[in-house]
Amino acid sequence: MGPHDGLVTAIVILLNLLPLIVIGGVVWAIVSLRRGDDGPDNVAITVRRVVVYILMLVTMILAASGLAGLAVELIDRDPDGNESLATALALSIVSVPGFAAVLKFADARLRTRDERRSLAWSMYLNTALLVTLIAASVMTVQALASLFEPADATEVVAQTLAAGVWIATWALHWFWLRPRHGIAGDVHLAAGSVVGLLTLGIGGAESLYHLFDSFYTTLFDDPIVHRGGPSGEDAIATLIVGATVWGWHWVLRYRTAERTNLWHVTVVPLGSLIGFVSAATTAALIINRVTVWYLGNPNQTQAERHFDHLPAETAVMVVGLVAWTYHRLVLGREAERNTPRRVYEYLIAGAGLVTAVVGASIVLSALMADSSVDRTNTTIAGTVTLVLGGLTWLWHWKLIGAAEHSDTPGERASTVRKTYLIILFGASVAAAIIAFIGLLTTSLEDVLDGNLSRTTLHDARVPIAVLMSVSGVAWYHLRLYAREHRSAASAEGGDLSPAILETDADLARLTTTPEPTPVRVAVAAPTGVDLGPAYRLVPGAVWHVWTRTDTLPGAQLDTEEFASEVADLPGSDLVVIVDSDGGVDVIPVEATG
């Protein structure tokens, strides 16, 4: 890819973000207005912030694009004409002074505490850091690739200058604006860590692919096989940039930072789960490919053709396994069974169960196919998927079962477990309904046409297989949820459901329970905190809520921490302090007069 193509690609990608930026600005304006006072002064301030920071972001993107294009054109002119030079000049002439003027205006306003703590400034700085980081990473990969491969010196310099413009723009925000005016939360660290991890994973997989590909070609001595893919220079460049970005954001800063909810999101779904799914998926493909070669009916008669995708699949499997193992070890340092650990185990268990259901559906569908269809390869693929998914689910469900055995009330009362059971039951029912509709449609069509025969079974084999697979899953999770719900209701003593009132003793216990003395709860929480879960955990209480003015809005209440502290203080009047990260301090009090 030449310097001009890289510039055009970067500009197109970044300009496509503008509609999202405008929509985001409108959203945060609405949110800010709803959270704050609706007086005319506050409305005007919010609108001013929205306009200023959207304008600042747009001019920044256009200015960097123009300067990068101008740097390219000064070194390596486009031989097809002056269109690229004219575009770069126009962007630079208009956007650079515009960005400088808006930046000066915003910098003066950011000297006030309210401006620095505003949602508008936080969203601008986080968005600007993310956009410039992505653009700098893309352009740096192109510059390094042109440096590694035999290329014209002018192209190397042009790519380097273009990358340097975006790196400088990112550095302006990271090293100057961020320390000068501050940034709330850890979104910038999480976003940078994710960008670095994905880039590092892609670069690692591409590099391993080329390494395995060389072994594969040597093994089979078949240079005719061309598997395509990125060049070795692009792979190494991507690996270097990914390692740098990930090391800067994660290794040096975010890994040892406070473990907020966003930190756990970065580790669990984005690190552990994606790595596990990548490793498991490619492992299934490799096992299926080997099994089909020895037991099935391969489409290719030559081994080097049949295993043509083996280098790429092996590379992705290794990278996914490393990513999953690393993030699992990072998460495993926490001894207590908290919400992130539960989320991890239930996510992996759910992924394994879904995979097993898919595999079972494939096997059942293949078994119901008529003799005109070669069922061998399909049965092998379904069996491999079923076994891998089933083993994954069984292993993690065993871990969950051990945790439930050691702390039955706590585990069963967790929101994560209830959500897991409800989602799996609901998804299973939805899949069963859709499958039943498909089965009924096929059957009724043949009945109305007078063609009801064994062919009908063949045509309806997929919905039948899905219906058979998901029905068991739905029934299992429904019974599990119902049993745990009844146990929890029974344990509460005064909150028995009608299904539990089976004897006169149950009815007497329900009707003779004395009316509890109302508990008074005083809460000081940041703006926007959803206290609904807390209300449900202290039923019948009289609540007094104050809004904290010393913290930024947007925190999420740590429901489990609140539940555990309230459980130790039954019947006490409480003072509850909600921190900016969602943590809570529950203090028992009593009236003195």
Image (cartoon, helix red, strand yellow):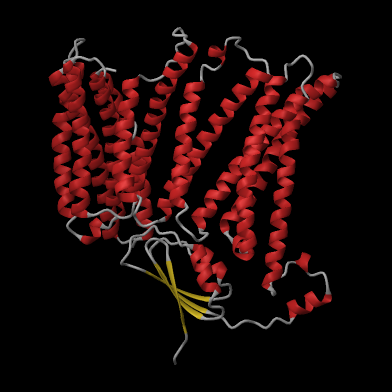
Residue farthest top in this picture: 224
368 is higher (above) or lower (below) than 122? above
301 is higher (above) or lower (below) than 447? above
Viewer can see residue 376: yes
304 or 128, which lies in front? 304
Q: Is residue 14 left or right of residue 265?
A: left
81 or 502, which lies in front? 502
188 is higher (above) or lower (below) than 222? below
Q: Is residue 107 left or right of residue 446?
A: left
Q: Is residue 229 left or right of residue 146?
A: right
Query: Looking at the figure, which quarter contains the C terminus?
Result: bottom left
Tell me residue 229's x, y (percent). 41, 19
Query: Looking at the figure, which quarter contains the N terminus?
Result: top left
Q: Quadrant of residue 75?
A: top left
541 or 262, which lies in front? 262
Tell me residue 353's x, y (percent). 64, 41
Q: Quadrant of residue 23?
A: top left
Q: Is residue 176 left or right of residue 465?
A: left
Tell me residue 415's x, y (percent). 57, 58
What residue is rendered at 47% in x and 17% in y? 216
Residue farthest bottom in this picture: 593
352 or 477, which lies in front? 352
Tell me residue 104's x, y (percent). 14, 47
What residue is rendered at 25% in x and 46% in y? 53
Viewer can see residue 91: no
Count of numbered marks: 0
What residue is rendered at 18% in x and 37% in y? 168
